Amino acid sequence: MFHVLNLLNNQTINLRGSLLGFEQLYHFQLSRVDEQSPFVYLQSLDEENIGFLAVSPFEFFQDFALTLSESDKKELNIDNPEQVLVLGLITMKEPFILSTINLLAPLVIHIEQQHGKQIILSEHYQAKTQLFAQQPLKESGE
């Protein structure tokens, strides 16, 4: 995975569609937090004051599964899984160990073509899953 992050480091990712809640944002620069970290920054190029911390869900959740619809594959021009980087957006908390990841709506990025889309998955994933404890948080638990 670090090889993929190196390939995309400081590259522009163009979204097909927008992020939920950020409908005006379509262009992001992806940059690594550091060489030893699986975390990346997604900095909006449309609105300089907006950025996200993200990570591949596969780094923290061994049983995470993603099945793209045929229409998503076609829209993103994806032929095989090796062409894809999947990122979950992180909601940072204090302390950081309480931070959550959005497993319900990950970003799927075509590595070579540098475009992506936020995909809504099945309801058994949560939008706020504790990143480090691997337990879903209930809305009332925040």
Image (cartoon, rainbow, N blue to C red):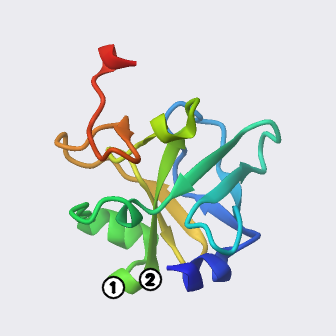
Q: Are marks 1 and 2 in contact (CB under 8 Å)?
A: yes
| Amino acid type, label 1 | Asn
Q: Residue furthest right?
A: 48
Q: Label 1 to label 2, Cα distance in Å? A: 6 Å
Q: Is residue 84 left or right of residue 91?
A: left
Q: Quadrant of residue 123?
A: top left
Write down the residue under mark 1. 80
- Residue 115's place in the image compared with 19, above or below, is below
Q: What is the x, y in percent for residue 14?
A: 63, 61
Which residue is depicted at the point 71% across and 67% down? 34
Q: Quadrant of residue 31?
A: bottom right
Q: Is residue 112 visible?
A: no
Q: Is residue 107 left or right of residue 36?
A: left
Residue 61 is tagged as: none
Q: What is the x, y in percent for residue 74?
A: 36, 72
Write down the residue under mark 2. 83
Q: What is the x, y in percent for residue 121?
A: 26, 49
